[in-house]
Amino acid sequence: MIQQRSWKRKVVVVGAGAVGATFCYALAQSGIADEITLIDQNSDLARGQVLDLSHGQPFFPTVDVHIGDKNDYRDAQLVVVTAGSKQRPGETRLDLLRRNASIIRSIASDIAGADSQGVLLVVSNPVDVLTRVAINTTGWPRSRVIGSGTVLDSARFRYLLGRHCRVDTHNVHGYILGEHGDSEFAAWSMTHIGGVHIDSYCPICGRCEDWTAARKQIEQDVIESAYHIIDYKGSTYFAVGLALVRIAAAVLRGQRSVLTVSTMLEGEFDLNGICLSVPCVISENGVEQIMAGHLRQEENEALFRSAAVLEKAISSLEEEG
Ligand code: NAD
């Protein structure tokens, strides 16, 4: 017998700018949400995005799209925060971090105040530091507050490696771990092509003369991807919008998907009190399991370097009081 669902798959998106709107557009087409609520401090922008998207209703699966307010957090299964400020001329990265931290604190305390039982997904940058801010502000268990982390970067990695090896991206499996930023790194020990470990694949493929150099180049290209896109068009939003749909599907459908979200480490990988990306099993409860497997020594060192970068950012934020 087919069971009727009595609840709605409701997603609240805070921030109706480029990333928030693109995510809503992709989410609507995916058919995985029943209700999409858009909130922005610029209510005209939110209203315009909702109208524009709603006019596409005949072309995608039925979904209730509307603007909302903080009352909408209560029954949301997933709240996605893309609200943020851009760097102002002459503003330091630290000043930007402080402004975005204060935006996240204010939104996270509204979410906590609404007694939501859902999962909170932070997207605004710097995502690892802001995920930690959101955990501290809500007081929620670490499992229910996650950052989009390196889900996007891992997709870039799979795309670039697949293109280099001339193999369909879908048959390339690998992860970018650590900070969503300059200190992130490719976990080559976890990388497979068509089920063959990359270390066995490279010698049999024979496409490049120096695969050590090729790997370094691919890793560097992943790190620099966002800079290039921002140079060309000002911001990135298509691929991140799709990465967010992937995370949303894991939460809304309880898929138990392994994704490199940013999560608070409490002893895993010998790190404590830091949010960064490692492979996690994601379901309707958020992080079900941190895959704290074995990393190679150089990967462990790279993870520690990422943690040190993030610790520095956290302490400069805390110095402010
Ligand atoms: P944007 O400027 O286009 O949109 C941000 C929106 O947030 C604006 O519409 C603004 O009005 C709104 N906003 C600001 N403060 C608010 C508040 N207190 N309440 C409600 N709304 C508020 O920026 P964007 O290009 O959409 O990027 C959004 C964020 O996502 C940025 O921090 C960006 O760096 C980040 N981002 C993250 C990733 C990732 O992989 N994690 C990728 C791309 C962008």
Image: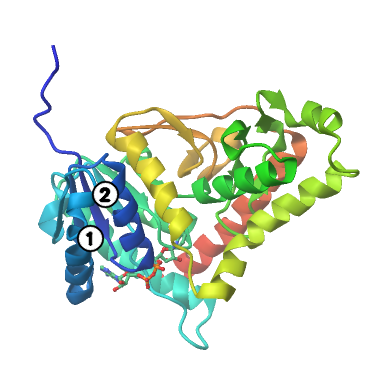
Residue at x 51%, y 41% (from the top left corner):
260
Is there any visible trace of residue 252 in the rendered image?
A: yes
Residue 132 coordinates in the image, percent (x, y): 42, 53
User: Disc 2 residue type?
Assistant: Ala
Quarter occupied by residue 123: bottom left
Residue at x 91%, y 43% (from the top left corner):
209
**Residue 131 placement, left or right of 220:** left
Q: Are marks 2 and 1 in contact (CB under 8 Å)?
A: yes
Residue at x 13%, y 44% (from the top left corner):
75
User: Disc 1 residue type?
Assistant: Leu
Residue 225 coordinates in the image, percent (x, y): 61, 61
Task: Examine the rendered structure and indicate whether residue 49 appears above or below residue 149.
Answer: below
Residue 156 coordinates in the image, percent (x, y): 59, 50
Q: Which residue is identified by label 1?
A: 53
Q: Which residue is identified by label 2?
A: 28
Which coloring applies here? rainbow
How far separated are the C-alphas under marks 2 and 1?
8 Å
User: In which quadrant of the rendered image does the N terminus lie?
Assistant: top left
User: In which quadrant of the rendered image does the C terminus lie?
Assistant: bottom left
Q: Earlier in the sequence, mark 2 or mark 1?
A: 2
How many neighbours does mark 1 have within 10 angstroms: few (below 14), some (14-19), or many (20 or more)?
some
**Residue 145 placement, left or right of 224:** left
Residue sticking out furthest to the right: 209
Quarter occupied by residue 100: bottom left
